[in-house]
């Protein structure tokens, strides 16, 4: 048999039961609390500390009021997400994820995430388009006044492929025999 403690044997109550109050605990007057709740509901976008500064109380007290009266807090990350989604909805359609990411100033993965939430339809680049963009940007970054041979050396590719790219993207190069920029077809005089 288990031994009973003195408190269990004397009172007949289990020690785990909560103490009953003779009177309910006194909280702040209801009128002041109700006024504070109105202000809390108006300022859900602010932090508990900012709301507490309005009343001159701690953020823990604001939190306790919100929990006690069931006022849900609109979290900052939800506000941020809604802001990005509204920005994505305002954008013109047909942007690539990379372009969208540069406009939102976010990584591409996050831009796709917000775009999917907003129901945005992307224009994805295939491998050929990516390659064309890459070489076009490489040619634009070179200084003017280069020959095909010098351009090929700077890009680190063959002479004939450089000629093909210059012709495709209308990049002017020097003939090598004159100072006029024009396209020179190898093998044709």
Image: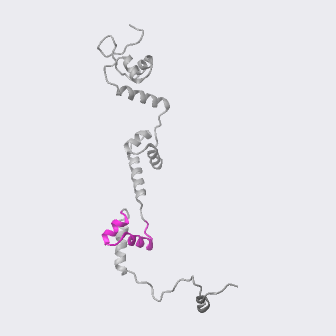
The reply to whether residue 32 is in sight is yes
Image side of residue 186 versus residue 56, left or right: right
Magenta region, residue range? 46-72
On whether residue 96 falls in the magenta region, the answer is no
Please name whichever residue, 143 or 171, is drawn nearer the observer in this view of the structure: 143
Q: Is residue 72 above or below residue 105?
A: below
Please name whichever residue, 143 or 44, is drawn nearer the observer in this view of the structure: 143
The quarter of the image holding the N terminus is: bottom right
Q: Residue 170 appears at what percent x and percent y?
A: 37, 22
Q: Residue 11 appears at what percent x and percent y?
A: 58, 91
Q: Is residue 29 above or below residue 6?
A: above
**Residue under the point 29% across and 14% down:** 180
On whether residue 47 falls in the magenta region, the answer is yes
The reply to whether residue 94 is in sight is no
Q: Is residue 26 above or below residue 61?
A: below
Q: Quadrant of residue 187?
A: top left
Instruction: List the single residue furthest toward the top.
Output: 189
């Amino acid at each position: 048999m288990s031994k009973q403690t003195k408190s269990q044997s004397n009172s007949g109550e289990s020690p785990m039961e909560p103490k009953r109050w003779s009177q309910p605990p006194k909280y702040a007057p209801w009128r002041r609390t109700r006024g504070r709740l109105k202000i809390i509901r108006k300022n859900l976008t602010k932090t508990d500390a900012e709301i507490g500064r309005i009343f001159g109380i701690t953020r823990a007290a604001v939190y306790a009021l919100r929990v006690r009266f069931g006022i849900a807090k609109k979290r900052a990350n939800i506000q941020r997400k809604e802001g990005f989604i509204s920005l994505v909805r305002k954008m013109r359609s047909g942007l690539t994820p990379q372009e969208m990411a540069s406009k939102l100033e976010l990584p591409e993965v996050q831009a796709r995430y917000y775009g999917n939430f907003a129901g945005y339809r992307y224009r994805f680049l295939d491998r050929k388009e990516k390659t064309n963009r890459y070489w076009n940007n490489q040619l634009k970054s070179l200084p003017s006044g280069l020959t095909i041979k010098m351009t090929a050396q700077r890009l680190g590719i063959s002479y004939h492929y450089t000629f093909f790219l210059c012709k495709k993207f209308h990049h002017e190069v020097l003939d090598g025999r004159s100072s006029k920029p024009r396209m020179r077809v190898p093998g044709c005089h």
